[in-house]
Image (cartoon, rainbow, N blue to C red):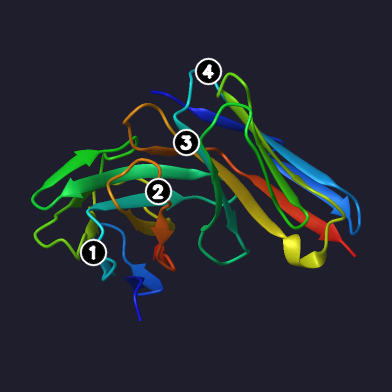
Amino acid sequence: DGGITQSPKYLFRKEGQNVTLSCEQNLNHDAMYWYRQDPGQGLRLIYYSQIVNDFQKGDIAEGYSVSREKKESFPLTVTSAQKNPTAFYLCASSILDKNTEAFFGQGTRLTVV
Amino acid sequence: GQQVMQIPQYQHVQEGEDFTTYCNSSTTLSNIQWYKQRPGGHPVFLIQLVKSGEVKKQKRLTFQFGEAKKNSSLHITATQTTDVGTYFCAGNFGNEKLTFGTGTRLTIIP
């Protein structure tokens, strides 16, 4: 069953702790993306990667870090430097051609207390 | 950076009424994609338009791409409760990454 998987679906953390969100895909996609969605708002790009061992900052990268050691995996770490980490985080993947759709995972809802 | 704006931000319609959301960019887009996100869900791809002036239909949904490739619209005829959700447009500027619009949240009054 091919697709893109995010885990966990809900995550609670104490303020000041780093937390890592998982994103795995078995679609053989080169490109992977992390978006943040706040209530009633659109999708803001955090980081994206088009090839293993390489990634670029999106529009709101501050306070976040990523790695792309394997094609299938693109974990996102929300660091303690992120001032407002509570949000819905969406991972997506696509083939590298610009004229192709993005496939999204189910999302992780992070709550920091 | 380059942005894609969508209006309206929210739309409440009686079931059976039509609905339209508009997407605008200040610069030319290579393509435009539309996604739907159901409440509590994740965005799901609906369609892509590439050609200037292109119009595509999916049952009650009509998608248009402007002649200048700077704007797009999604029109839903005779809305149903299953149409509830947030509709996003997304586009590429040249070879840049996909940029999402701000979304339009549609609610249906039965």
What residue appears at the point 27 percent right and 45 percent down from the top-left corner?
A47
In the displayed structure image, the side of residue B91 where residue B36 appears, left or right = right
Element type where label 1 sits in the image: loop
Q: CA distance from mark 1 to mark 3?
A: 22 Å
| Mark 1 closeness class: few <14, some 14–19, many ≥20 residues within 10 Å | few
Element type where label 3 sits in the image: strand
Mark 3, residue position: B91
Which comes before the other along the chain, label 3 or label 4?
4
Name the quadrant of the N terminus of chain A.
bottom left
Q: Tell me the amino acid under the disc marked 4.
A: Ser
What residue appears at the point 41 percent right and 74 percent down from the top-left corner?
A9
Q: CA distance from mark 2 to mark 1?
A: 14 Å
Which of labels 1 and 3 is toward the front? Answer: 1
Mark 4, residue position: B26
- x and y percentages locating residue B85 in the rendered image: 67, 58
Q: Is residue B37 above or below residue B62?
A: below
In the displayed structure image, the side of residue B110 where residue A13 appears, left or right = left
- x and y percentages locating residue A35 in the rendered image: 38, 50
| Mark 4 closeness class: few <14, some 14–19, many ≥20 residues within 10 Å | few
- x and y percentages locating residue A8 in the rendered image: 34, 75
Mark 1, residue position: A28
Mark 2, residue position: A100
Q: Tell me the amino acid under the disc marked 2.
A: Thr
| Mark 3 closeness class: few <14, some 14–19, many ≥20 residues within 10 Å | many
Q: CA distance from mark 3 to mark 2?
A: 11 Å
Can residue B23 be spotted in the picture? no
For disc 4, the chain is B
